[in-house]
Image (spheres, grey):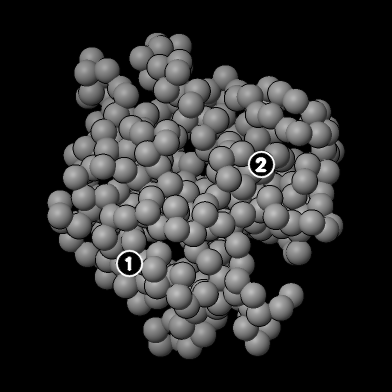
């Protein structure tokens, strides 16, 4: 690979495509379902009827809290940014993918613009080499393991200049439980493909929890290919929640909410009222008001690093609440809505 900018537009690949048009993986990666837990829980909480407020508040209160340093106080004039990553041991507990599952290294910035105008999601590729305070240069996916969430927050802030207001971590063991609690979801594939022994046919597939993990963790895909699938799955889930009003359905609400909150660990400053308030701000996450971006990278001296000019423009857009304008200027950085 030459020193050219990495593009978020996966549709431009010409060679080495997998069965569904996505290039084969460059190395083994874990299952990754970008922002599924946090985004889903706050969207679903916002849709909850007033009659179950006490139950919801108790469930939100059961989310584990951990101390995290270097978090900035949120300000209405600056919006809010949440750093979202994944747990170390989640996917390995799922039998169907146990042999190839490991920590995905997911690093996401979930941003709400000032005035609650829109939501933006920025993914930093896990293999990006960055400067880590006190540790020199390393892949950003390894920072949490050596210094915990505080060092990761400090590193991302130093890298981007974006104030990080909150931290959240997902335990992916519960992804399958969540999809099953929803009664399964429907995904669409342009052609038949196989993952972990499961055959996904061309067209619409109704899948349960384990199949969702197999779909997003297909070992023949690159990191970018898995990220594209997981964002598609995220939108499918949010669309189902919104269209079927699942939290006001007494047969569904209990299991869905419990599955969502059981996936999360958040910083100790993240109060119940903040989570519940944030719900109304993210109600349009699956809709056109949201923008999904992959931070642009390039390969320099054999290492993947951020592309300087576009990355600087991206972090400025996050701070100024102009992510949508950035997406219009750099359309190749936008994650496609579906694979």
Numbered mark located on residue 339 in the image = 2
Position of residue 325 relative to residue 189, above or below, is below
Out of 75 and 20, give the one closest to the viewer. 20
| Residue plotted at (27% across, 50% down) | 113
Q: Residues within 10 Å of mark 2 (few under 14, many from 20)?
A: many
- Could you tell me residue 214's position as x and y percent? 71, 40
- Could you tell me residue 205's position as x and y percent? 71, 24
| Residue plotted at (65% across, 29% down) | 187
> Are dots 2 and 1 in contact, CB under 8 Å?
no
Q: Secondary structure at mark 1?
A: helix
- Give left or right: position of 25 versus 111: right
Q: Secondary structure at mark 2?
A: loop
Position of residue 60 relative to residue 54, above or below, is below
Numbered mark located on residue 316 in the image = 1
Q: Is residue 331 visible?
A: yes
Q: Which residue ends up furthest to the top in the rendered image?
A: 250
| Residue plotted at (34% across, 61% down) | 317
Out of 180 and 161, give the one closest to the viewer. 161
Out of 250 and 136, give the one closest to the viewer. 136
Numbered mark located on residue 264 in the image = none
Position of residue 54 relative to residue 228, above or below, is above
């Amino acid at each position: 690979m030459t020193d050219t900018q990495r593009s978020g537009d996966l549709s431009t690949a010409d060679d080495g495509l997998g069965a569904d048009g996505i290039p084969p993986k460059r190395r083994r990666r874990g299952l990754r379902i970008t922002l599924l837990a946090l985004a889903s829980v706050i969207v679903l909480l916002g849709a909850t009827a007033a009659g179950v407020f006490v139950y919801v508040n108790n469930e939100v209160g059961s989310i584990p809290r951990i101390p995290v340093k270097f978090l900035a106080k949120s300000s209405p004039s600056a919006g809010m940014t949440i750093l979202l990553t994944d747990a170390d041991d989640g996917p390995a507990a799922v039998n169907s993918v146990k042999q190839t599952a490991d920590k995905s290294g997911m690093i996401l910035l979930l941003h709400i613009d000032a005035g609650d105008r829109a939501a933006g999601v920025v993914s930093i590729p896990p293999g990006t080499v960055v400067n880590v305070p006190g540790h020199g240069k390393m892949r950003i996916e390894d920072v949490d393991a050596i210094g915990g969430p505080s060092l990761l927050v400090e590193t991302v802030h130093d890298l981007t200049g974006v104030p990080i207001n909150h931290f959240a971590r997902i335990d992916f063991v519960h992804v399958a439980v969540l999809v099953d609690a929803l009664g399964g979801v429907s995904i669409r594939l342009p052609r038949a493909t196989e993952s972990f022994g499961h055959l996904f046919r061309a067209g619409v597939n109704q899948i349960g929890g384990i199949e969702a993990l197999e779909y997003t963790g297909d070992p023949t895909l690159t990191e970018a290919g898995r990220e594209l699938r997981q964002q598609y799955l995220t939108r499918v889930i949010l669309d189902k929640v919104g269209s079927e009003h699942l939290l006001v359905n007494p047969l569904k609400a209990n299991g869905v909410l419990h599955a969502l909150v059981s996936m999360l660990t958040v910083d100790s400053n993240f109060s119940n009222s903040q989570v519940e308030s944030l719900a109304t701000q993210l109600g349009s996450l699956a809709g056109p008001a949201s923008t999904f971006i992959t931070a642009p990278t390039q390969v320099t001296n054999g290492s993947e690093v951020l592309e300087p000019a576009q990355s600087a423009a991206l972090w400025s857009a996050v701070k100024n609440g102009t992510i949508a304008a950035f997406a219009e200027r750099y359309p190749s950085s936008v994650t496609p809505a579906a694979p």
